[in-house]
Amino acid sequence: MKPKVFVSRLIDREALDMIAKVAGMEVWRDELPPPYEVLLEKVKDVDGLLSLLSDRVDTTLMDAAPKLKVISNLAVGYDNIDITEATKRGIQVGNTPGVLTETTADIAFTLLMAAARRVVEADRHVRKGQWKTWGPMILLGQDIHHATLGIIGLGRIGIEIAKRARGFNMNVLYHDVVRNEEAERQLGVKYISELNELLSTSDFISVHVPLLPGTHHLIGASEFAVMKPTVVFINTSRGQVVDQKALYEALRLGKIFAAGIDVTEVEPISIDDPLLILENVVITPHIASASVHTRKNMALMAAENLLAGLRGEVLPNCVNPEVTQ
């Protein structure tokens, strides 16, 4: 008998075909994720689950899925899954690292440029019929070239951001819990041990850290207070890394110049959120990996993780390898 799997969203057809060849598969085809109560029903007799960040995979859900062998998360992050509980139960958990690194760096730098040069605000200006003439003081932004960029978290994506910054002759600083001397030699980036020093000296700040207990609200009111009033702040990591109310106040009061964010504390952001009233913030709907090529590769990688787990093999990208040791 074929193993059974549940795929919590419609993904690339080639990846679904891979799964369908070896497993009985049900796919949730709605645009919105399955409600938690529905997810509990869908996993009752499955051997594998292909999940997204919007799916909460906790103790209760695992209790509802006694046959579950593998959880394949279509994302680099996996803070939606109780990894400790999965490991305790011998369930392998997979993710999709690496494949979206450069695509995410592209969107981070896109947000940096758009916020700095007020591109979205300028587009609205034109569409509202407000463009009356060329003016020397209209929609002035911040120069990117030769400015100082501070990167918080010099992992794979942070390194790609540093590479892109070199093309603009930017001075690149970074702060991380682990110093990367090889990156310093190869990219000419400078390590800053104290976060506040990086915050106070950077013209642009881009955040690239995972969501952990120690990074929750890593950037809040006190951090915004030490930034330059001309700084452009970028976040493409996780929304909860930034205190969103503090970000709003910093933007509203002009404590920082602008922000570009692809993630929010609650997703989707409420249409009533005061951030949406501000002109000096660009907000995109968590689309950092949303290119045709990258999303296809993510789906294929997630399918490969899922199938390996169903076969009882070690996942190609396993976040809890101790399960198989």
Image (cartoon, grey):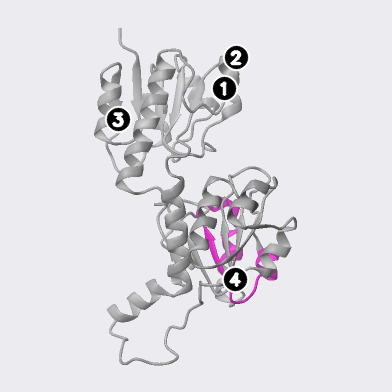
Give the Cα distance between marks 2 and 4: 47 Å
Q: Residue at x 70, y 47 (%)?
A: 179
Task: Write down the region rendered in magenta.
Answer: 221-247
Q: Residues within 10 Å of mark 4 (few under 14, many from 20)?
A: many
- Which amino acid is tagged 1? Pro
Give the Cα distance between marks 3 and 2: 28 Å
In the rendered image, which quarter is residue 146 located in?
A: bottom right
Question: In the image, 56: left or right of 291?
Answer: right
Residue 217 or residue 201, whichever sits in front: 201
Q: Read off the residue under disc 2.
A: 325
Q: Relative to 290, does residue 226 appear above or below in the rendering?
A: below
Q: Read off the residue under disc 1.
A: 321
Question: In the image, 29: left or right of 325?
Answer: left
Q: Are marks 2 and 1 in contact (CB under 8 Å)?
A: yes
Q: Relative to 192, does residue 122 appear above or below in the rendering?
A: below
Residue 150, position as x, y percentages in the image: 61, 62
Q: Secondary structure at mark 2?
A: loop
Is residue 180 visible to us here? no
Q: Residue at x 50, y 26 (%)?
A: 93
Q: Read off the residue under disc 3.
A: 15
Q: Read off the residue under disc 4.
A: 203
Q: Secondary structure at mark 4?
A: loop
